[in-house]
């Protein structure tokens, strides 16, 4: 099958911008027209955009924008984060793979990246839509010497790093919505999922999952996400280099992480506040125990959200979905 694939791609290369007829393909590959159609469908599944015109045949409009292990590694300026990369074509969830690797004892900074996730996860077992060749779906393993209660700070730190990287690579101005969303023009472009393996008083590893919609067009999203999700490409009007974005995220993360380990959360908190849209506004917070409404006062030194209700009572919120 790989031989046939190679032959087919060679034929497309030779015809360049012309159409390649189904007849010709079936003759040269020695297979039926139905089989040709199947090969074309396979190419589409893999991210090729093909134009089909009756009586003319097929033409490749766009080849898939793949990334490779080399592209992530070459030119990477970090010293620890992403120095070990596990790059996959397709996985269930990069979180799952990273959990296993962390358990097996891989060093801090190990990164799992996949072109596609078949069962990408959000918080509370929600699903995260992760189609092939469009986004950045990755999980990073950290091993900070910290008590487990500090882990949520890393979600906020990661949000700042991704925001800075998006600004740097695209010039877009994203906003952070507490705790784990990055929005562009009020729509979600990034989700972060922080999980850990810990003992009662000590973190063994933190697994930071990052899902970034990069080169999606609106029809790549399922209907139910059309009004709430966006991608960098939709906002920018052009394709974004995903490998470059990954490298930029890792570098910003490394800088912030070093600062955090040396000076604590305060400098990160200041940066985070400069990007936050949910603070100083009336919000609705849906937690697993109930819904609260009031003014978002800010975050504590630990990264916990403070909400003042209409009786002037302050609530400390560790985890919730926020509506602004
Ligand atoms: C999150 O959860 O936002 C965390 C998402 C983390 C995904 C990364 S990808 C790499 C790593 N491997 C994984 O398996 N996961 C991590 P939450 O706040 O619970 O938001 C989930 C909700 O966002 C869903 O219920 C949908 O409404 C919406 N959603 C799903 N896919 C989306 C997408 N691609 N873009 C925007 N919104 C999406």
Image: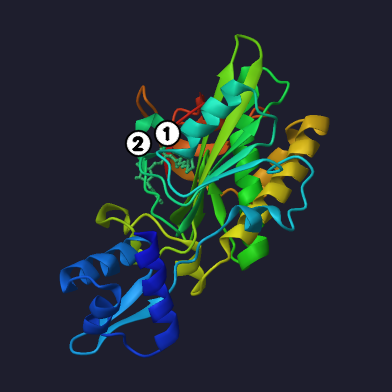
Report helix, strand or loop for mark 2.
loop
For the point 51% across and 62% down, the residue is 66
For the point 78% across and 31% down, the residue is 261
Q: Is residue 182 above or below residue 231?
A: above
Q: Is residue 53 above or below residue 126?
A: below
Q: Quadrant of the N terminus?
A: bottom left
Of residues 212 and 52, the one drawn nearer to the viewer in this rendering: 52
Residue 65 seen anywhere in this rendered image of the structure: yes
Residue at disc 1, CB closer than 8 Å to ligand 1:
yes
- Image location (x, y in percent) of residue 162: 61, 50
Residues tagged 2 and 1 counted as in contact (Cβ below 8 A): yes
Report helix, strand or loop for mark 1.
helix
Q: CA distance from mark 2 to mark 1?
A: 6 Å
Residue lying farthest to the right in this orientation? 262
Q: Is residue 268 left or right of residue 208?
A: right
| Residue carrying label 1 | 123
Of residues 304 and 159, the one drawn nearer to the viewer in this rendering: 159
- Image location (x, y in percent) of residue 317: 50, 27
Report the disc number at residue 126.
Answer: 2
Q: Is residue 57 left or right of residue 231?
A: left
Residue 49 picture quarter: bottom left
Q: Quadrant of ligand 1?
A: top left
Residue 27 picture quarter: bottom left
Count of numbered badges drawn on the protein: 2
Q: Residues within 10 Å of mark 1 (few under 14, many from 20)?
A: some
Residue at disc 2, CB closer than 8 Å to ligand 1:
yes
Residue lying farthest to the top in this orientation? 200
- Image location (x, y in percent) of residue 184: 50, 59
For the point 36% across and 31% down, the residue is 125
For the point 61% across and 58% down, the residue is 243
Residue 303 seen anywhere in this rendered image of the structure: no
- Image location (x, y in percent) of residue 237: 48, 74
């Amino acid at each position: 099958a790989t031989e046939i694939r190679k032959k087919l791609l060679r034929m497309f290369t030779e015809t360049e911008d012309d159409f390649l007829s189904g007849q010709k393909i079936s003759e040269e590959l020695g297979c039926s027209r139905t089989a040709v159609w199947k090969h074309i469908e396979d190419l589409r599944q893999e991210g090729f955009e093909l134009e089909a015109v009756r009586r003319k045949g097929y033409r490749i409009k766009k080849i898939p924008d793949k990334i490779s292990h080399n592209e992530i590694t070459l030119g990477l300026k970090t010293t620890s984060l992403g120095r070990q990369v596990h790059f996959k074509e397709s996985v269930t969830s990069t979180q799952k793979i990273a959990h296993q690797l962390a358990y097996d004892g891989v060093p801090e900074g190990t990164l799992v990246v996949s072109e596609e996730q078949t069962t990408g996860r959000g918080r509370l077992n929600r699903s995260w839509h992760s189609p092939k060749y469009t986004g950045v779906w990755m999980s990073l393993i950290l091993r900070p010497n910290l008590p487990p209660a500090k882990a949520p700070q890393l979600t906020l730190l990661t949000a700042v790093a991704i925001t800075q990287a998006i600004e740097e690579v695209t010039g877009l101005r994203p906003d952070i919505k507490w705790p784990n969303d990055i929005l562009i023009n009020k729509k979600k472009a990034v989700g972060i999922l922080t999980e850990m393996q810990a003992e009662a008083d000590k973190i063994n590893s933190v697994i930071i999952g990052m899902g970034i919609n990069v080169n999606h067009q609106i029809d790549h999203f399922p209907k139910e996400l059309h009004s709430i999700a966006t991608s960098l490409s939709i906002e920018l009007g052009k394709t974004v280099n995903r490998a470059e974005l990954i490298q930029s995220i890792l570098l910003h993360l490394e800088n912030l992480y070093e600062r955090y380990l040396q000076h604590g959360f305060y400098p990160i908190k200041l940066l985070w506040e400069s990007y936050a849209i949910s603070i100083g506004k009336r919000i609705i917070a849906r937690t697993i125990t109930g819904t609260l409404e009031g003014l978002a006062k800010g975050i504590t030194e630990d990264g916990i959200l403070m909400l003042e209700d209409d009786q002037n009572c302050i609530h400390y919120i560790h985890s919730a979905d926020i509506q602004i």
